[in-house]
Image: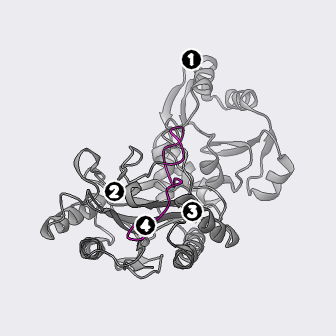
Amino acid sequence: MERIEKLQGSLVEREIDCALMLYHRDVYYYAGTARPASLAVTPDSVVLFTRRGGSWIAAESPVQDIRDGGLSSILDWMREKGVQNGKLGMEMDLVPANIYLRVREEFPEVSFMDISPIILEQRLIKDEGEIESIRGACRMVEESHRHLPLLLKNGISELELAAELERVVRIHGHETFAMLRKRMETEMGYALVLSGESTKVIGGYGQVVTGTGLSTALPYGPSKRKITTGDVVVFDIAGMNEGYHSDLARTYCVGKAHPKILEAHAALVAIQSAMLEVAKPGSSASQLYETAIKKAGELGWEDYFQGYGEGKGTFVGHGLGLEVDERPLLSPTDETVLKENITFTTELFMVHPDFGEVKIEDTLLVTDGGSEFLTCLEREVIEV
């Protein structure tokens, strides 16, 4: 209940009478269950409203006041608390419009507040249990990368290779999904295998190389393209263990890598190393971005770093935890100050019109003296 008590303190500071959470990741963070439920919190009370699976929820959650009921029951409870004349916090980045309109119709005098920034600020700092879950997510994706050289061969398709690698992480406990808070933009798989021409496709999702997918209905991810000798193969995979994510990408070549590929990769390692010199408590997310851009320029790769032309991206990493797209975003505009126990990635890539993408991504933890690699794989191009 410590997390809920901290949230209640934030409500008091901001004079918010009630926070209503509907999104399963936020409900899980505070109430310990991801089953169908909504969490209502006031400065002096907590109620978990369940729609289904109440007995299971009661066994999982530390919340004592658990009641059956949907939105009507929640609104009735709010009336008892006098919320209809006060300030109501909701996850405004996620709340369905029909629910918002229903609440507004029932409570025309209420002042709505966006509770998501408060939630995400609290979730930014991970506790020991969360960090251990992320470490577990790192171990499973490392296993998939170790298996890739055993599977990669001339003639295998991106889809076939991705399926085999997904099998590896599933056996090691992967929980099937990669959770995105911005999920209206796209649903995404967790294993991205791209090769050859596919590594040049920056398709509009997240400012990263996306590949073509299997159809225009979901133009993201591995395709049926056959991998051939000489191809660059990029494998980017998000792990999920006990609800928490990791992210790990490496570059492979079928046969000998062209010298320019090796040069691009060496530049990425140098950029990552420069970022890690800055990635310590007190630095800002934007400082890491500026460090990366400056280093790419010094090395002569600024035109191809994080894409090129109209596909050029403006970030070099992101936070992760219960979602794979958490704060901070390592971008020129994010002034989030790094603190101990923030988890984040460095997601670095070159995209060149001649050879496609070269990529390296790792998951890291901010410590009291710097940053620690949570993913532990060699930072090199692997030739198969």
Q: Nearer the viewer, mark 1 or mark 4?
A: 4
Quickly name the residue at label 3.
162
Q: Is residue 48 above or below residue 90?
A: below
Magenta stretch secondary structure, dominant: loop
Q: Looking at numbered disc 1 in the image, what kind of residue is underneath it?
A: Pro
**Which numbered disc, 1 or 4, marks the residue that appears first in the sequence?**
1
Q: Is residue 102 above or below residue 343?
A: above
**Which numbered disc, 4 or 2, marks the residue that appears first in the sequence?**
4
Task: Tell me, for residue 108, which label it has, or none.
Answer: 1
Q: In which quadrant of the rendered view does residue 316 lie? A: bottom left
Query: Quick one: SS at disc 2?
Result: loop
Q: In which quadrant of the rendered view does residue 43 lie? A: top right
Measured as percent of width and height from the top left, residue 346 is found at 37, 66
**Which numbered disc, 4 or 3, marks the residue that appears first in the sequence?**
3
Quickly name the residue at label 2.
336
Q: Nearer the viewer, mark 2 or mark 1?
A: 2
Q: Looking at numbered disc 2 in the image, what kind of residue is underneath it?
A: Thr
**Which numbered disc, 3 or 1, marks the residue that appears first in the sequence?**
1
Left/right placement of residue 317 relative to residue 185 reads left
Disc 2 residue crowd, few under 14, some 14–19, many 20+, Cα 10 Å = some
Q: Nearer the viewer, residue 252 or 254?
A: 254
Kindly indicate whether the residue at mark 1 contacts the one at mark 3 (C-beta within 8 angstroms).
no
Measured as percent of width and height from the top left, residue 190 is found at 56, 58
Quickly name the residue at label 4.
233
Would residue 9 be visible to someone looking at this image?
A: yes
Q: On the rendered image, what quadrant is the C terminus found in? A: bottom left
Q: Looking at numbered disc 4 in the image, what kind of residue is underneath it?
A: Val
Q: On the rendered image, what quadrant is the N terminus found in? A: bottom right
Q: Nearer the viewer, residue 261 or 153?
A: 153
The residue stretch that appears in magenta: 213-231
